[in-house]
Amino acid sequence: MKISQALSKWYRANKRDLPWRKSQDPYKIWISEIMLQQTTVRVVIPYFEKFIKSFPTVKALANATEEKVLSHWSGLGYYSRAKNLHKAAKKISAQKYFPRTYIELLELSGIGPYTAAAIASIAFNEEVPTIDGNVIRVITRLFDISHDVNSRSGKEAIAHNAAVLIKNQNPSEHNQAMMELGATICLPQNPMCILCPVNKNCQSFKAHTMNQRPVKQKVRKQEPWLWTLYVVKKGNQLALVKNSNGTPWLKNTWVLPGEAKEWNNKTPPLCDFKHSITHHKIFVKIQHKKQKDLKNPNVVWASAGEMKNLGVSSIVQKVLNLLDR
Ligand code: SF4
């Protein structure tokens, strides 16, 4: 594909001279990718060089004490990354085989989909795209993807186009070029489109939507609530009311009587089960009550079978299932 070829050509001529790019050694690529998580390239370079000098091979890392490994990590933060590196190095050293495929790499401690794809493609040329924040930005702009990047359709569009771009290309060079473009040219604000090697193929450049891509809808903060539902029996029937007991959800739906309040305490309340409706995280507590305790006069009585015809909320069904046990 034209895009990948133009990108790779540009990458060969413009790539930054970074110490982990001097070879295709999977060990060095792995160390650099773990160090680069939540840390900038500038900060990582001296750490990487010192780390590789002290632990030049997987075996050297596996044989080091945890104390020594952590001392080399001191200042990078997120020490669980160093502990996982050490654990995985011991595993690789014991099995005397460095995993070569995306699937095998995912088995190692601390290696997620992005890092597995980076090692598999850069070191072993496996045709698997690396998809991180930089690459997501580049792809949503190249294809002018207007879906929210966190939605299912957005993720599918990104994964599809990433796979199309890398197909039948040089995976190692292609992925590094995509990441380099995102890090140096296709910047989050004010991308340098004039200098971009693929601006002729970029749909958002043509549509002037670069600064609106990627689309990230704000995730609404979850609101915790405690909803106490009353189980009031008359024979095989239960009392139901049209929901109006102060909840912002399921208005005018048949539910059990009860009361709801926002839960502002940091410790979650004791409850029988949890239920989510939009951004409301509801802790549901069941309370058995007598008919005389019902304050709501607009009650209807329904058996489990009759409830189906009334279209009661699924939350009522969950209560019935618990009562059946
Ligand atoms: Fe990014 Fe601009 Fe290049 Fe498009 S033309 S990929 S928006 S830098």
Image: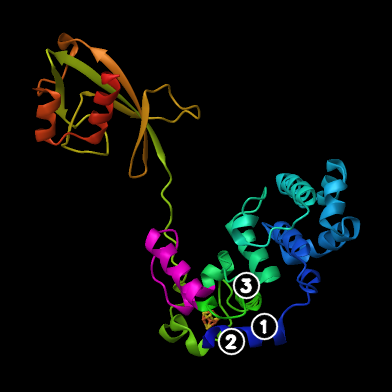
Inspect the image, locate mark 1, and give the three-letter code of the amino acid beneath it: Tyr
> Residue 284 in the image: x percent, y percent?
34, 27
Q: Residue at x 86, y 63 (%)?
A: 49
Comes first in the chain, label 1 or label 2: 2
Magenta stretch? 138-164
Please tell me how crowded label 3 is: few (under 14), some (14-19), or many (20+) other residues with Cα within 10 Å. Answer: many
The residue beneath circle 1 is 11
The residue beneath circle 2 is 5
Q: Chief secondary structure of the magenta span? A: helix
Comes first in the chain, label 3 or label 1: 1
Q: What element carries label 3?
A: helix
Inspect the image, locate mark 2, and give the three-letter code of the amino acid beneath it: Gln
Alpha carbon distance from label 1 to label 2:
10 Å
Q: What element carries label 1?
A: helix
For this orientation, the residue located farthest to the right is: 54
Q: Quadrant of the C terminus?
A: top left
Up the image or down, 192 lies above or below 152; here it is: below
Q: Can residue 309 be seen in this view?
A: yes
For this orientation, the residue located farthest to the front is: 96
Q: Can residue 196 be seen in this view?
A: no
The residue beneath circle 3 is 179
